[in-house]
Amino acid sequence: MKWLIIGLCILLLGFGWDVLFVNLPYQDPTPAMQEQWNMDKTIASALYWAGLAVLLAAFLKTLLLRKTNKRE
């Protein structure tokens, strides 16, 4: 259960990063602004994928533990 909460927190952190720092792309950015936007988008994407991976692993672990406990 703890890993499900951790995965959800990471996923929400990615969403928060996306909303606060990425938002919409600039209309006519300078190269530095575009580079910063790309970096923030990469960070948000990495947080989304990490959160999803942790959630999936925790979900599979929970299913496997329940399945093995029923056999015994």
Image (tube, grey):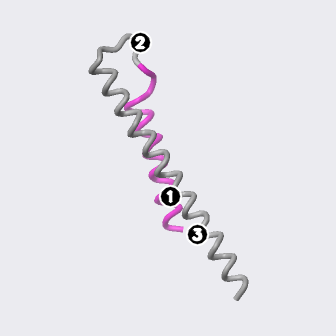
Question: Is 28 displayed left or right of 63 in the figure?
Answer: left
Residue nearer the viewer, 11 or 37: 37
- Relative to 55, does residue 38 appear above or below in the rendering? above
Please state which amino acid type lies under the numbered disc 3: Lys
Secondary-structure class at tag 3:
helix
Label 1 vs label 2: CA separation? 35 Å
Which disc number belongs to residue 27? 2
- Where does the image place residue 37, in percent across and percent down from the top left? 36, 27
* Residue at the outermost left position: 32
Q: Earlier in the sequence, mark 1 or mark 3?
A: 1
Q: Does residue 64 appear left or right of residue 5 in this picture?
A: right
Task: Looking at the picture, tell me which residue is in the foreground, 8 or 72.
Answer: 72
**Residue 67, quarter of the rendered image:** bottom right
Q: What distance separates the C-alpha of mark 1 from that of mark 3? A: 10 Å
Query: At 45% from the left edge and 23% from the top edge, which residue is drawn?
Result: 24
* Numbered disc 1: secondary structure: helix
